[in-house]
């Protein structure tokens, strides 16, 4: 560290600053009391659009109103509270369990309901790689308990205006898909759903999906039909510019990605833990103002690549919550993996530490 | 020669610790308006933090992002990066209290809109020409932050030791917010001063920015306390008036810092040999963070994400 040194003091400027401070503070106590007594703050300019007091998300404490088994190994929770924030199909909640574990679950209820949130959770045993969250929901959580939630956030938004929609759900991956199907059906859109699972008894929401349109839903239960013919389904269902939404195990998502007809757009929701930093495909990041392009490998982050080129780039938590590395995106679609930005902020910015490009290239204002 | 060296700020190496932001969250649903039961004056004096910090700490981050490229010392750079994340989380955490106050009939917006102006405009980037003037303004703000951090560390150390708040039944969530924040302020108390030393360190600048920061803090704080008491829907008559006597009484009771302790902290910052590592205890801060409900939940969250 460099030793401290006294720069020649800038007397004039200092005087100006001190005078300014004195002006702020120097008004008489009596005048202050009079003005405050008049129940208004005495004049200081205000920011036209205040920033403080509008937190991006609030932690809410909700009551477990219902805790019901809706399929083998699947529990549906109804969480009640007043004036809940609105959400769109595809959104998820952070659920803070009584033990302190935090897990993310897709909302599968009615977005218009502002008095409750509904999630459905499959129990995943330790032998299947479960980390304890779902077991706590199944075994410990009961009606009347309180849980904290954060969000909702939407990393898997349903785009409007596609000529047709194809949904592929694997097991509990049906949860974000269900409100999407309802929304597309409600606006009279064209849709098809491939819903795969181990066996019918373990697949939730079968009745409701039948009602939404039995002829549009293909249910493939592993014990009856074996592995789903993803390629066959897609070739029949997906036409020009169809939007394809997939939520399920990695294998299913890979199968869809492989069989995807060229003119379709693919939207994936992983069962991944939040803010998984690595993992993904390689892409390029153009830094427009610096006139440079850097490569991001599958196991590295945008932030790491940008820092290699611009070492002064600010960041901090590297886990997608502090917001320091938020950056304006000029071109390219982003796969947001943070839990901080609002859906509006996601329109034009990203957190470089965790989020990635959807395509081959993005352009940043750096 | 030895005399001269003694007048340089000398850090205590053992107080240094790597810094990381913690992904905390607090639920305010069960926190009453007067979270220190029966003591609206103390409640609202401490509540002023929620008015000043969302904008103030956001401004710290804004300034430090500009200062970061100027740092030529790797360890200090790591400290500044940790500091930025912690301050960003402080800002977010205090910001989330404000809607809760509003829902209880105490709308903070008239005050916070002014604080927003103060930090976003008055202390913002201005349209100074590049070069000397812009650098001068950056250094001035870095020094201001160092002076403010002297007080945040002072308050952090105070709240970690303010047992009287526990004895009087303060709301546990609010106490955890204050102590998590206070502990992180103690943890990173040297960063702002080290950055100031690294980029400039001039004594005249230290003194004048201290004078500005101190005056502004006193001004904003008493104004905030008065604002809250005046607009608190549950208070009437003289309970709505804040006096200096109230402040001294709370100090003696142990629910606020004492006037004496605050006065004594002034010459310490102005001493040429001042270094923040000589005040407060990193060990105490780390011990609190290891037991804080919010910080341990953040830890569980971070580990769960692996």
Image (spheres, coloured by chain):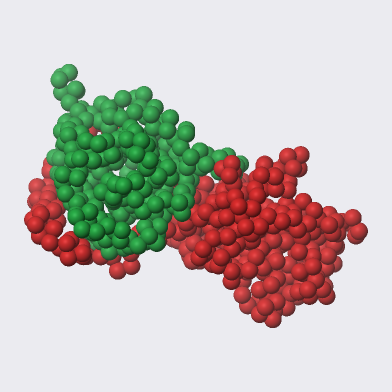
Chain colours: A red, B green
Image label count? 0
**Position of residue A170 in the picture relative to residue A119 (left or right):** right
Quadrant, the N terminus of chain B: top left
Which residue is found at the position 48% from the left and 40% from the top? B293
**Picture coordinates of residue A338, whole percent (x, y):** 54, 54
Residue B177 occupies which quadrant of the picture? top left
**Picture coordinates of residue A303, whole percent (x, y):** 50, 49
**Picture coordinates of residue A278, whole percent (x, y):** 60, 47
**Position of residue A24 in the picture relative to residue A271 (left or right):** left
Question: Relative to A228, does residue B212 appear above or below in the rendering?
Answer: above
Which residue of the protein is positioned furthest toward the right in this rendering?
A224
Is residue B226 visible in the rendered image? The answer is no
Question: Relative to A313, does residue A330 appear above or below in the rendering?
Answer: below
**Position of residue A348 in the picture relative to residue B258 (left or right):** right
Which residue is found at the position 69% from the left and 65% from the top? A177
Which residue is found at the position 24% from the left and 59% from the top? B236
Which residue of the protein is positioned furthest toward the top in this rendering?
B2
**Position of residue B30 in the picture relative to residue A183 (left or right):** left
Q: Nearer the viewer, residue A132 or A308?
A: A132
Quadrant, the C terminus of chain B: top right
Which residue is found at the position 68% from the left and 75% from the top? A184
**Picture coordinates of residue B259, whole percent (x, y):** 18, 38
Which residue of the protein is positioned furthest toward the bottom in this rendering?
A188
Is residue B166 visible in the rendered image? The answer is yes
């Amino acid at each position: 560290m460099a030793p401290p040194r006294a720069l020649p003091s800038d007397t004039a400027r200092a005087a100006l600053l001190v005078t300014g401070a004195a002006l702020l503070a120097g008004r008489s106590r009596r005048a202050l009391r009079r003005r405050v007594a008049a129940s208004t703050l005495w004049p200081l300019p205000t920011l036209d659009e205040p920033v403080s007091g509008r937190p991006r998300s609030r932690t809410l404490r909700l009551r477990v109103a219902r805790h019901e088994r809706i399929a083998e190994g699947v529990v549906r929770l109804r969480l009640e509270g007043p004036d809940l924030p609105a959400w769109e199909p595809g959104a998820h909640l952070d659920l803070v369990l009584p033990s302190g574990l935090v897990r993310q679950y897709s909302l599968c209820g009615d977005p218009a309901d502002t008095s409750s949130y509904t999630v459905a959770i499959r129990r995943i045993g330790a032998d299947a790689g479960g980390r304890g969250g779902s077991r706590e929901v199944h075994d410990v959580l009961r009606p009347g308990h309180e849980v904290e939630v954060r969000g909702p956030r939407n990393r898997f938004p349903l785009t409007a205006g596609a000529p047709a929609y194809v949904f592929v759900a694997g097991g509990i991956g049906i949860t974000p898909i269900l409100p999407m199907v309802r929304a597309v059906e409600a606006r009279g859109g064209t849709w098809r759903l491939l819903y795969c699972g181990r066996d019918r008894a373990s697949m939730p929401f079968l009745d409701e999906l039948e009602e939404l349109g039995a002829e549009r839903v293909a249910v493939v239960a592993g014990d009856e039909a074996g592995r789903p013919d993803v390629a066959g389904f897609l070739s029949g269902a997906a036409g020009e510019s169809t939007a394809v939404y997939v939520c399920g195990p990695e294998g299913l998502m890979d199968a869809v990605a492989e069989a995807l007809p060229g003119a379709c757009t693919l939207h994936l929701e992983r069962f991944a833990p939040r803010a998984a930093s690595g993992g993904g495909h390689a892409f390029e990041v153009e830094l427009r103002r610096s006139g440079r392009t850097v490569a991001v490998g599958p196991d590295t982050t945008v932030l790491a690549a940008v820092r290699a080129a611009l070492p002064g780039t600010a960041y901090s938590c590297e886990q997608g919550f502090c917001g320091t590395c938020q950056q304006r995106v000029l071109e390219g679609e982003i796969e947001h993996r943070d839990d901080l930005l609002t859906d509006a902020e996601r329109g034009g910015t990203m957190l470089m530490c965790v989020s990635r490009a959807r395509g081959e290239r993005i352009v940043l204002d750096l | 020669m030895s005399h001269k060296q003694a007048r340089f700020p000398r850090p205590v190496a053992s107080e240094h610790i790597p810094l990381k932001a913690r992904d905390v969250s607090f639920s305010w649903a069960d926190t009453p308006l007067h979270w220190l039961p029966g003591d609206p004056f103390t409640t609202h004096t401490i509540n002023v933090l929620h008015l000043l910090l969302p904008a103030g700490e956001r401004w710290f981050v804004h300034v430090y992002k500009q200062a970061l490229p100027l740092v030529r010392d790797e360890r200090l750079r790591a400290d500044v990066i940790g500091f930025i994340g912690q301050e960003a989380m402080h800002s977010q955490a205090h910001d989330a209290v404000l809607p809760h106050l509003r829902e209880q009939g105490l709308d903070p917006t008239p005050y916070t809109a002014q604080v927003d102006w103060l930090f976003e405009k008055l202390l913002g980037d201005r349209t100074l020409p590049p070069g000397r003037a812009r650098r001068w303004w950056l250094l001035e703000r870095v020094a201001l932050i160092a002076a403010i951090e002297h007080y945040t560390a002072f308050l952090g150390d105070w709240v970690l030791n303010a047992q009287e708040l526990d004895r009087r039944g303060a709301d546990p969530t609010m106490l955890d917010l204050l102590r998590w924040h206070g502990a992180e302020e103690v943890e990173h108390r040297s960063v702002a001063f080290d950055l100031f030393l690294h980029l400039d360190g001039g004594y005249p600048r230290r003194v004048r920015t201290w004078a500005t920061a101190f005056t502004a803090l006193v001004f904003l704080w008493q104004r905030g306390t008065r604002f809250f008491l005046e607009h608190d829907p549950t208070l009437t008559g003289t309970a709505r008036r804040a006096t200096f006597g109230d402040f001294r009484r709370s100090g003696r009771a142990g629910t606020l810092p004492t006037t004496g302790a605050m006065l004594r902290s002034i010459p310490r910052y102005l001493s040429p040999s001042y270094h923040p590592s000589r005040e407060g205890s990193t060990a105490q801060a780390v011990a609190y963070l290891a037991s804080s409900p919010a910080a341990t939940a953040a830890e569980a969250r971070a580990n769960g994400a692996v």
